[in-house]
Image: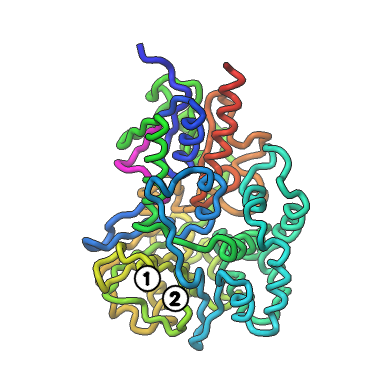
Amino acid sequence: MPSMLDAVVVGAGPNGLTAAVELARRGFSVEVYEAMETVGGGARTEELTLPGFRHDPCSAVHPLGAGSPAFAAMPLARHGLEWLHPELPLAHPFPDGTAAVLSRSVGETAMSFGAGDAGAYRRLVAPYIGHWESLAADLLRTPWDGLPRDPYRFARFGLTALQPADWLSRRFEGERARGLFAGLAAHAIAPTSGLATGGVALMFALAAHEVGWPVPRGGSQAISDALASYLREQGGVIHTGTEVKRLDELPPARAYVFDTSPTALARIADLGQAYKHYRYGPSAFKIDYALSGPVPWTAEEARAAGTVHLGPTAGEIEAALAAAVGGRDPEVPFLITAQPSMIDPSRAPAGKHVLWAYGHVPAGWEGDATEVIERQLERFAPGFRDLVLARAVAGPPRIARRNANYVGGDIACGAFAGLQTLIRPKLARVPYATSHPAVFLCSSATPPGPGVHGMSGHHAAKAVWRRLRAAR
């Protein structure tokens, strides 16, 4: 009869793989079960349009991955992960052909806002520049896990970060800085008037200055493949093409760790209404393009940027987010776009390019936003449509089918709203533990939340190994 495993992980996304690695490298026996035929979760790369065009169905640009304390502690470069940095992390163009930028340089960023706001931006980021290592460790953590490494800076950041982005941006006078800042906050997929959206914007800005906004060579799949390779090196086993519907379908183990939505965890582990109050947020409408040439951006800065935000003013961005949260059809969407083939030729045939773009729509929305998205693209890149060779369109239903964690098409696996902004998935001393002593949750529904950084898996694994050692 086979011996009992120490841990079984359900779901081979970045958090599930990170949790498995953290346990395996400490000598625990670990097996991972993944429903799809390949590992990856929200970090995959596929030929969605035409042969030779490699697209990322979900995440594409990874500031928090490059700056992740969990990933930094692993030899992922030895397992094939190579970060590629664009000339500019982010461009935020305006209809007049100019752009504000988020550069690796604080000075270049500040000056792109205009002289009136340059000093205000420098003062906003100055207390944290040069302290990414301790700041990331403190912010990408959970309060139950001891004291912060840098209590003063953590507290200072927290007092600023709790503010809504539209409050925090009042320190800027012009639309250039306010627009770029609102675009950064919009990554939370919540109105910029929401609690702690200022912290999201500030965190992404600091990441650009400290670690960049890179893409992995070959696509986001490289992150997942590197984690899987390192896990196998540590003795871990991965089973793909195996959907888990009930806990008793899994082999006997001392702990079960779920990289799933709270809803799926409750169903599989028979936890009843344990997460009945957990809320999911609005969705995305995603289009992956195969292009015959580079995007013809009017703004020169956008041609050098890995990521381009389309929605010039803070007011326009707020209106787009409010429509998605309020259940209304998109009219003028705020778009987050990425052009990885500008710095990674392996992503498209010679001379061709890929573009990754999404706007925000209501949860479960069944409409077609292709026209309004392309109208917004044409606004900042006239002639864009003439370059389109093929497109792969994914609204909320398809996004949800592609990844079971994205309930209703919510790519954040949980709304960034109300108390759930700070408390995920519910109020608990150890948010990764459940009412079942052997069952744990490690997905982005747990602290520190969404993003390909592995920190939810890292902290969940810490809770698991403490439980396993106590049991021994």
Q: Are marks 1 and 2 in contact (CB under 8 Å)?
A: yes
Q: Which residue lies furthest to the top in this view?
A: 1
The quadrant of the image that shows the C terminus is: top right
Q: Is residue 435 left or right of residue 245?
A: right
Residue 205 or 179: which is nearer the viewer?
205
Between the residue at mark 1 and the residue at mark 2, the CA separation in whole angstroms equals: 8 Å
Q: Is residue 351 visible?
A: yes
Identified by mark 1, the residue type is Met
The stretch of residues the image draws in magenta is 32-43
Residue 111 or 181: which is nearer the viewer?
111
Q: Which residue is identified by label 2? A: 304
Q: Is mark 2 on a helix, strand or loop?
A: helix
Q: Residue at x 35, y 34 (%)?
A: 243
Q: Is residue 330 visible?
A: no
- In this rendering, the answer to whether 380 lies above or below 218 is below
Marks 1 and 2, the one that precedes in the sequence:
2
Q: Where is residue 453 in the image (x, y as percent from the top left)?
A: 52, 49
Q: Is mark 1 on a helix, strand or loop?
A: helix
Q: Which residue is identified by label 1? A: 342
Q: Where is residue 327 in the image (x, y as percent from the top left)?
A: 51, 61
Q: Where is residue 464 in the image (x, y as percent from the top left)?
A: 56, 29
The picture quadrant where one finds residue 211 is bottom right
Q: Residue at x 29, y 68 (%)?
A: 290
The chief SS type of the magenta part is: loop
- In this rendering, the answer to whether 37 lies above or below 319 is above
